[in-house]
Image (spheres, grey):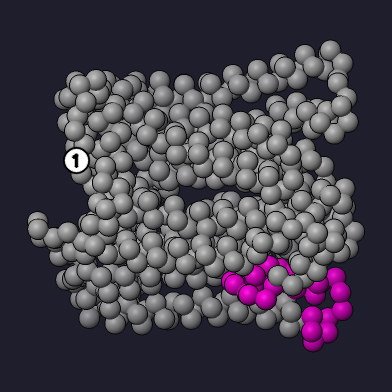
Amino acid sequence: MLRTPPLFLLWPHLRAAANAGRSRDGRSRVRLALFAVLGLAFIALAFFGARWMFFKFSAVEYLAELLIRRVLGLVLLFFSGLLVFSSLITAFSTFYLADDLPLLITAPVPVRRLYLARLAETWAQASWMMLVFALPVAAGCGPVLGAPLWFYPLLVALMIPLTIMCSTAGAAGAMLLAWLLPARRTQDVLVVLALVAFLVLYVAFRLAEPEKLLDPAGFDRLVALIGSLKNEGGFTTPADWYVAALFGALRLDTGPRDADAVRGAVGPALALVSGALSSLFVGGWLARAVYFRSWSVSQEGRTGDERSRLARLIGLVVPAISKPRRPHPFDGPGVAIRWRDTRVFLRTTSQWTQLLLIAALVVVYVFNFKHFRTLVEAGQIGPTFLLFLNYVLSVFVVTTLEARFLYPAVSLEGRAFWAVQAAPVRARELIDAKVRWGLWPLLAVSTALSVGSGWLSGAGPVGALSVGFLAGLSTWSLTGLAVGMGAAEPRFHEDNPARIASSVGGVLFMLLGLAYMVAMVFLLVGPLGALAYHLQTGYVPEARRLALDVVRVVGAVGLSGFTHLYPLRRGATRLETLP
């Protein structure tokens, strides 16, 4: 065996990343510079937004620290779950489907070093969302709590072992699935993934205790809320260790340095570090035991007469999907494209299985709105804040889904895009078919999420429907932005949608989508505030204020229309100019 360090195996990927900004026309450098500026702007915006929210929490007596810990724990739990599942899907590509694996498998490279190299690649592709989205939110509590300067490097230092544990768990799950269920029974793998995701959804649903939300008398306003927040730390996760280590370090800096304080600060940090090292050891041991066997069976094909139990089940439940659709005389090319994309989506593991975990995490977040409902009833926060919190949550979820499923839609045409070019199908028809394919499901998700959150938080029918309408408008706008940007920068050589979504263009779409959300909040905070105040008191603003609110609403609608239409036109022009 060659004593090959993992860094040597990563050298081609490092060189490719270093040369990513080099191109003959200089467009790559401009794109990377724009991406860096927008990325830093978003990180700063997320930091200041989180700081503003935590400052609002600090106004609640005897409850500020508990609320900050709870919200921070929810954010980290949400992103940790996404990271585990994203690493699971990404590991199938890096561990089993990469083009250089046949060469590395036959080379005299120790399996543990190969595992560490592939795990590092998986971590780099999947963990960026934790560093870009969750880290600024965690840093936002620093100014509120009066944290010293060393607090912020500690955030990054503790985030690294947390992301390593999540990526290692996803890679281990991928190796076990590939070892237990070979590639010729891929449909059976989907059954297992669906069952696991369903169990996660059920457990998360039960941990949220939704039956308490149906009985508002079960909470005695702030007293019961404080008790519920104190008692909700029984089931510890790495995200809880992260939060406990941060607050323990702050308490150690500001309070007495006795044995309990040292144990409260050092214990969770050691748990994170030891957990990361243990996960690397267990992952290396698992790779040595099953990786070569799982890679061998992953190369096996499926015989033509094989039909899995899942395929037969889908044929019984949804016959229209399992059988070929008969063409209609009035069907255009867009109908055929949408029908084909639906069948491909249902056959691709990495596409539809992620919806299950996202649904589970969204359910947990929605049912945790009971805390904010109690704060509204106690007069600690206003109904307008709650309306915008519902709106921001729904738009954030939709932006994440569109980055994962709609941004790669055009690129997934793959190397066979020449067939679309040769067919009598204009580029705008192709793009419109992609938009219509993803628009209606996402509209259903955003509307259900915003209206459901509004109903559970006691926003009232008018407030819930208003937020639902705004969420639907933003979903329509961001759908055009996702498909248009994906068409303007296609990656037909890449067949992994996770890599396409995590590319520079995918992250840029996420940042522009969140910037659009911030602009919509800025434009609509006045009109929605006036509406909430009118519903409470019946007060009608003066004519000048009403005219200004109408102008803001028209500006929000115009911004949504531009965000939807302009990227589609630019994307269609780009596809028409391709050779």
In the picture, measured across the screen, residue 568 lies left or right of residue 365, that is left
Q: Does residue 297 appear in the picture of this structure? A: yes
| The furthest residue to the bottom | 259
Residue located at (52% from left, 28% from top) = 477
**Quick one: 252 or 23, which is closer to the camera?**
252
Residue located at (85% from left, 58% from top) = 221
Image quarter hosting the N terminus: bottom left
Image quarter hosting the C terminus: top left
Q: How many marks?
A: 1
> Is 435 within the magenta?
no
* Residue 522 image offset from top left, x and y in percent: 71, 30
Residue located at (74% from left, 41% from top) = 459
Q: Is the residue marked by circle 1 packed among few (<14), some (14-19), or many (20+) residues within 10 Å? A: few
* Residue 512 image offset from top left, x and y in percent: 54, 35
Compared to 186, does 459 lie above or below? above
* Residue 13 image offset from top left, x and y in percent: 34, 56
> Is 255 within the magenta?
yes
Compared to 84, does 540 lie above or below? above
Q: Which residue in the protein does label 1 denote?
A: 324
Compared to 577, does 261 lie above or below? below
Residue located at (24% from left, 20% from top) = 330
Which quadrant of the structure image shows residue 25? top left
* Secondary-structure class at tag 1: loop
Which quadrant of the structure image shows residue 239? bottom right
In the picture, measured across the screen, residue 345 lies left or right of residue 446, that is left
| The furthest residue to the left | 304
Q: What range of the chain is rendered magenta?
A: 233-261
Q: Does residue 42 appear in the picture of this structure? A: no
Compared to 45, does 155 lie above or below? below
* Residue 578 image offset from top left, x and y in percent: 26, 26
